[in-house]
Image (cartoon, grey):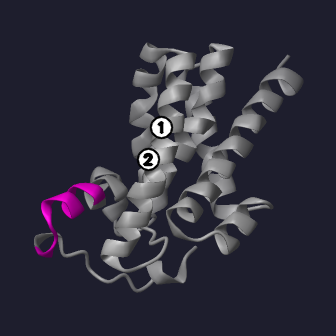
């Protein structure tokens, strides 16, 4: 966890331009990252609300949108960090949106979108996002800016997605 999340400076929306307000509002996960405790967990849980959208769109369109979400997230997270003047502040949870969404993509492929698998994906993503095994820890420590904020969660999402495949193919079948 970023030590800056322990002493968070307040976010003064009223002192921002409308553009900055919009970007910061997206960066803090439409408010889900403003939870007083465990903002990353709240942001990841909020991202589960996208699940019906992913099911409706199907796998190919969902992959395209998650890639777009990840690419635009580089700007959103970087700009939010710049505006609130704290790198990778815990309140910035757009990266959790992308990582959690990546985790759920295998469920579309496997046609296993049910609440048991969605909750399992949520737990797996949170484990990797908090534990930060290699290369997640490397990305978290060595890559800066918006790309660095996004990269560790993208990798955590890929690790969690891989676990879903392993559990499905090698443990349950």
- Along the line of sight, the residue nearer the viewer: 105 or 130: 105
Q: Which mark is residue 72?
A: 2
- Along the line of sight, the residue nearer the viewer: 124 or 105: 105
Secondary structure mostly seen in magenta is helix
Q: Which region of the structure is painted magenta?
A: 15-23
State which quadrant residue 105 falls in: top right
Would you place residue 42 above or below residue 5 in this image? above
Residue 31 place in picture, x, y as percent: 28, 56
* Mark 2 surroundings: few (<14), some (14-19) or many (≥20) residues within 10 A: some
State which quadrant residue 60 falls in: top right
- For label 2, the SS is helix
Is residue 16 part of the magenta span, yes or no?
A: yes
Is residue 19 part of the magenta span, yes or no?
A: yes
Residue bearing mark 1: 68
Residue 19 place in picture, x, y as percent: 19, 58
Query: Could you tell me if the residues under marks 2 and 1 are in contact, i.e. CB atoms within 8 Å?
Result: yes
Residue 171 place in picture, x, y as percent: 86, 26
**Residue 44 visible from this viewpoint:** no
Q: CA distance from mark 2 to mark 1?
A: 6 Å
Q: Residue furthest right?
A: 170
Q: Residue furthest left?
A: 14
């Amino acid at each position: 966890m970023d030590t800056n999340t322990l002493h968070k400076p307040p976010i003064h929306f009223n002192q921002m331009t409308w553009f900055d307000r919009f970007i910061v509002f997206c960066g803090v996960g439409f408010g889900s990252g403003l939870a007083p405790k465990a903002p990353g967990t709240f942001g990841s849980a909020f991202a589960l609300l996208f699940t019906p959208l992913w099911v409706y769109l199907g796998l190919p369109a969902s992959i395209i949108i998650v890639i777009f979400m990840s690419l635009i997230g580089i700007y959103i997270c970087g700009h939010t960090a710049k505006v609130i003047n704290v790198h990778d502040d815990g309140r910035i949870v757009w990266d959790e949106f992308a990582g959690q969404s990546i985790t759920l993509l295998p469920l579309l492929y496997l046609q296993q979108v049910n609440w048991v698998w969605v909750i399992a994906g949520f737990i797996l993503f949170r484990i990797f996002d908090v534990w930060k095994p290699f290369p997640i820890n490397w990305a978290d420590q060595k890559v800066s800016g918006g790309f660095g904020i996004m990269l560790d969660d993208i990798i955590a999402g890929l690790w969690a997605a891989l676990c879903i495949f392993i559990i499905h193919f090698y443990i349950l079948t």
